[in-house]
Amino acid sequence: MARSIPPKSSAAPQQRYRGAAPYVFLTPYLLVAVVFTLYPLLNAGVLAFYQTNGPASRAYVGFDNFRFLLHDDVFFKALKNTSVFAFCSVFLQLPLSMLLALLLNSGGSRAKAFFRLVLFSPNLVGQIFVGILFSVMFTPRYGLINRFVHALVGFGLEERWLGNPALVMPAIVLTSLWVWVGFNMIYFLAALQSVDKSLEEAARIDGANRFQVFWNVTLPSMRHVVVFVLITCISGSFQLFELPLALLPDSAGRGPDNSGLTVIGYLYQVGFDAGDLGLGSAVGWVVAAVIFALSLLQIRLSGAARE
Amino acid sequence: MNPLRAVLLLVLLIFLGLLMRSPRDPRRALSYLRFVVLVFATLLVLAPFAWLVAAVFKDKSVFNDYVFFPPPTAWSSHTINLNNFRRLFGGDDTVQGKVFFWQYVINSLFFASAGTVLQLFFCSLSGYALAKYEFYGKRALMTFMLSSMMIPGVLLFAPVYQMMVKLQLVDTYHGMILPGIVGVYGIFLFRQAVLAVPNEMVDAGRIDGCSEFEIYLRLVMPLVRPMSAAFCLITFLGSWNSFFGPSIFLQTQEKLTLPVILNLYIGVYANEYGVFLAGTLLAIIPPAILFFALEKEFVSGLTSGAVKG
């Protein structure tokens, strides 16, 4: 559901407090952070160099976990699927969200509130529930989606979306559009409303057309929201797991020929189904590294765009 | 020519008509187009919901005969009935005896609300401490908090699970709730809200003899109520829909939450879509009610950090 936002900090001018109160108030956080974040983080570093069989027994294997991943075709398939999904999220989902936000922003406020409410509503439905819903809607011949596609273009009624390796990813992407287009739209809409209208006006008077105004004035002035949405979108895409799991129940989220397997799905399989938490940790590090690198790249690119 | 294509053609013809009437000034045509796109998007978003409601009340025997509801002429207890719900609430036979569907609903409600209440308390308390006190080590602490937000959850699944097993917290609710009782995201959300509370109020409270905790509880908390509402909704939705944690930590069937059990039901009721879809519909209703009641607060809570910046 809600992806987290890092709020910007601003200074609170107060003189130093000498009592114990702030420390007492922050103790619960410190305890939780040490026990459930800091210690596991260190442990994740250690664990990645072990092979485990369930949580109890383990043996040191050095870099073997990472070596195994480098040579595992299934892991690369999962990595490829997840990258394809992330790519589609960025280049399909976000533009659609932006388009809807722009359309909404130019309308009256009554209609805006209504459309915003409706378009956002799929985001309330948990990914598992969405997966369950769409797994039935993708039924050949009778499913809602097959019937709709058939009525629209005249073919595809018998298509087995979730049984055809070539169509599993499109099905997942289609489902994700239903869930997240409205979610990103909320952010874009809020950002659009805070854009300085006089700047856009000035550009228009200078003879810029609608697209030029959007590309050269509106988009740059909502830059930091766009970067924020991009980063959460990419890191969210790399953590995709529940949607394909419920969408492809026959194969536990793998899909035919592993066509629906995501990296987290892979982690779940090796770490929790097969019981090798060490290998699971190694997968975790690889995914974390990918997310981190992509986020850094995003920030760099957006910094370059400012100059 | 099917109805869908006929409608699309009609929409297109109206657009062309508007464009022809005033080709120099296409504003009317464009605002019509804008409206059409929005309505079309709305229908696409709502269609699965409508389909779900219809699917749940249709009898198994006519499930595939109609896309949505059968036409009113075909309504009878053979086509529309509550059989799916009857099957759903009939109970599962398990090792621990019969477990009824209500049990999972109660589990989910308990898990989500207990987590929300605890998070509300601890996050707001920490957020208040960060907003209204200058103390030794504050800077280092905040740097640590912000950088800990960069750690993807993926990395911690395996080691946290291992620790839970060691602490014998697997298959318990407190074990599942404990790691999430306070989070950096919530703390910063509250810190930002409390910053807007004037320092004079806090000082006045002190002069009047309030303890520091009383200042937090009696003076500050009532002032950040809109943020609290948004935060509760976001947290509740997150726990209500969460799957990964509960599916790993919970083992006994009578302890499962709705997402976990419904995911299992897909396999159990393989050819009776109506049954697990009925459960899914019930699982969507509580978040929907909360959302419609608190929509404005929710949206502003979601976007506050990103947009104000």
Image: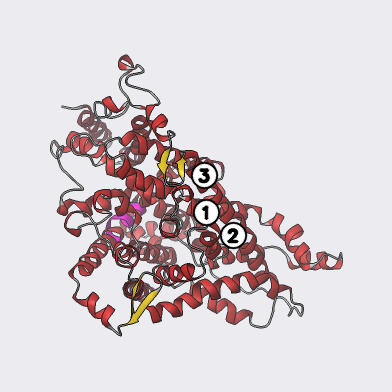
Real-space Cα separation, disc 1 to disc 3, in angstroms = 9 Å
Q: Is residue A272 above or below residue A111?
A: below
- Which residue in the protein does label 2 denote? B119
The percent coordinates of residue A6 (x first, y second) are 50, 67
Q: Secondary structure at mark 3?
A: helix
Q: Is residue B176 above or below residue B15?
A: below
Residue at coordinates 39% horizontally, 57% vertically from top-left? A205
**In this rendering, the label closer to the viewer, 2 or 3:** 2
Real-space Cα separation, disc 2 to disc 3, in angstroms = 19 Å
The percent coordinates of residue A24 (x first, y second) are 70, 73
Q: Main secondary structure of the magenta part?
A: helix
Subunit of label 1: B
What label sits on residue B291 in the rendered view? 3
Question: Are the residues flagged by discs 2 and 3 from a single subunit?
Answer: yes
Disc on the earlier residue, 1 or 3 = 1
A8 to the left or right of A261? right
The percent coordinates of residue B190 (x first, y second) are 61, 63
* Residues rendered magenta in the picture: A90-97
- Which residue in the protein does label 1 denote? B234
A14 to the left or right of B12? right
Residue type marked 2: Gln
Q: Nearer the viewer, residue A77 or A306?
A: A77
Q: Residue furthest top?
A: B73
Residue type marked 3: Phe
Q: Secondary structure at mark 2?
A: helix
Residue type marked 1: Ile
Q: Nearer the viewer, residue A214 or A83?
A: A83
Q: Are marks 1 and 3 in contact (CB under 8 Å)?
A: no
Q: Residue furthest bottom?
A: A62
Disc on the earlier residue, 2 or 1 = 2
